Amino acid sequence: MSAPNIRLTLRTLLAYLDDTLEPAQALVIGQKLNESKPAQDLADRIRKVTRKRGLSVPSAAEGQGTSSDPNTVAAYLSDALTSEQLAEFEQICLESDVHLAEVAASHQILTLVMSEQMRIPPTAYKRMYELIPGPASMPNRAPATSMALGAAAEATTDDRDDLDTAYLLGMKAYSQSEPVGVRVMKWAAVAALVLGFLVFAFLAWPSGSVEIVKRPDAIVASTKAPVPPTTTPKILPTPPTTPAPLPPPTAPTPPAPTPMPAVPPVEPLPMKEDLVPKVPPVQPGRIAVANAEDQGDQVLLTQKTEGVLESWVRVAPKAEVMSTDRLLALPGYRARIKYDTGLTVELWGNLPELIPIQVLQTAITPTIADAGYDADITFHVGRIYLQTSKAGGAKVRLRFLKEIWEITLPDAKAEVAIELLHAPTPGPLAEAPVTAAVLFANAGSPTLATRSREAVKVPPRQLMLWTSTGRGLEGPRIPDTKRKEPSGEYFERISIYPNEQSATACRKVLDGFAKRLPEAISLGALLAEKNLGAANGTTLDDLYGARFAIFSAAALGKYEPLAEAASDPERGFARKAALDALRAAFAADPGGEAVFRAAAEPKFRFSKAQMTVWLRRLPGLSAAERVDFGTIDQLFADLSAPEIAVRELAIYVLLNDLDPVSNNQKSLTAYDAGATVEAREAPVKAWKRRIEEIKTAIREKPVN
């Protein structure tokens, strides 16, 4: 059978995106789409404009027969326009986001209407009869052969429309062929089933997920010691003392990240001038310095600059890695590059579902190394492993912030793990993020020299710690568990799943994304598809696919999807993931805050002053704010704010910063910022009681 002859037009592209073409036609259009860059851009644009909030509608003042006439849109979708009208209409759609969104959304709606049975909520059905007075408003009255025209119904401000949505789930449409008594009995039966389901869901709802790691200075501290990770390289069941049930499909609860090492904010030691070598700046030039290893389903990206545009592309297996090109392992992926000198650098990405720690993406920029060095690397964020195949070892220069580390691997058996994390500084002042760098000797005894310290040998399974607010470089020493420093198992290359089923679903998402990436239209389009796949929250694959897409958008510096997710009225899990991603993104890339602000203000419908307050609250609460009654009262008041982004940030800060132990109380975690006022009423009352308990604990706390 020959392939069908079908042209790639706007209408066929809409049919392809809405999955209404025959399989053979869809295959042809998909192939043409992959071969056409303008068509790929148009597909991306259609996805964006149909979700763009605040977009106006075509003006009706242009008159009948114009591109803004609904009849013209209907005729276009019905293939009833002449060839001249068709070309003119499509050209207008290509030039105007308003018209393109109108025709794309209409096509989506028609697709749903043609494939789904209409549902009429009983409340709406009842109000239809209430619009007309007299006998005509009686639901059981048989219609006459003719009906007089009635007067127009009075305008009403009935707010019961919000109640209709709850009855659409599973509600069968009314059939005119059924007797009235049967319809009434069905209505009553369905209402009883819905009520029974809600009662059962409330009683069966899980009371918590993985154990939340408490901050040492929280208001109500937990006395339970954290469970150290195991070294057994397999999927671990959830410990019985800390149940971690599978999150419900509509609201997956990710495990809480482990906080960075708690280092007292003291002044750094003065730098010894005689120990500061004259380190040359990064050498200019762009040459091949290493090769990407072939690791199958792993994803390594590189950022290439073309004119004024920056784009991320996948590094092909065994391809050359160029100096000055930033390399990125997306959250959840690991990738390795190998130098001709035998040095191997592994970029190690992670997702909270795999290991509940702060590491997400890992980014480095390799540069040209000086004589005597195997590599010169600028480290941006994440975790890397260094190894060498040379018996004589290797010497690496590592740069981050204003620090320069010179790491020497003594032989081929040595291995070091280096982690660089940035955390936002909480509080009302826009202070610089806190940075912590840890070097851990996985094997062998590497040597570390810095700009302020002589070369020191690090014994096996010991660490060196540097913080931007601490006392410079500390160690070597065995990890101090009292200071919550990472132990040796923390740097093992195994996943310690806090929840087996969630982690399995997450791994499935990562594997599928890696397989589809080579054939995808673009990286951005594939991430957008993953993000939008969970619009209805149907499966765990969809939910964790959206979470992965949100974390990846933050890693790539794409802030518009984060602004959309943070204000999404339907997907609470997307709003939570966006706030997690923004905290990490702003700490690693302070310049991203301005980019996010520009994207978020129109979506949040905030003023510039409101946006400033929201961004200052995002990093969390300082120690002073956690005991300030004014701050606490404002957080509680924000639970009832009109803006969904304000409500979501308020519950996020309450659960993550002010009172983490509240994550174990169902009445408090039941709050959903996207729910109706009525649905939020009970959780808000529960939070009011909890706020008073917190204030009482503050008053009774002894003053040191």
Image (spheres, rainbow, N blue to C red):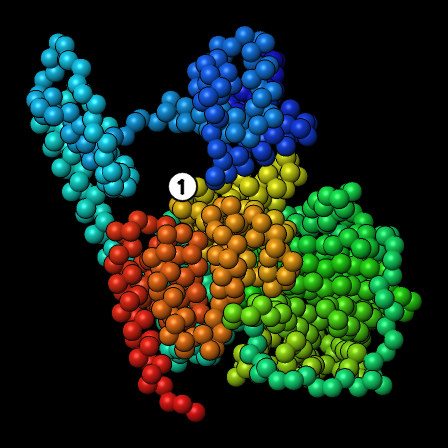
Q: Residue at x 36, y 86 (%)?
A: 701
User: Which residue corresponds to the image point at 46% horizontal and 21% vertical from the top-left?
Assistant: 61
Mark 1, residue position? 536
Does residue 334 lie above or below 633 as drawn? Answer: above
Whether residue 503 is visible, yes or no, is no
Amino acid carrying label 1: it is: Asn
Q: Residue at x 50, y 38 (%)?
A: 52
Quarter containing the C terminus: bottom left
Query: Residue 460 in the image: x percent, y percent?
Result: 69, 79
Q: Position of residue 275 (x, y in %)?
A: 83, 84
Name which quarter of the figure residue 590 lies in. bottom right
Residue 495, image x and y in percent?
55, 62
Local secondary structure at mark 1:
loop
Q: Residue furthest top?
A: 82
Q: Quadrant of residue 520?
A: top right
| Residue 423 located left or right of residue 446 | left
Within 10 angstroms of label 1, few (less than 14), some, or many (20 or more) residues? few
- In percent of the image, x 79 and y 59: which residue is there? 366
Q: Quadrant of residue 225?
A: bottom left
Q: Is residue 672 left or right of residue 410?
A: left
On-image quarter of the N terminus: top right
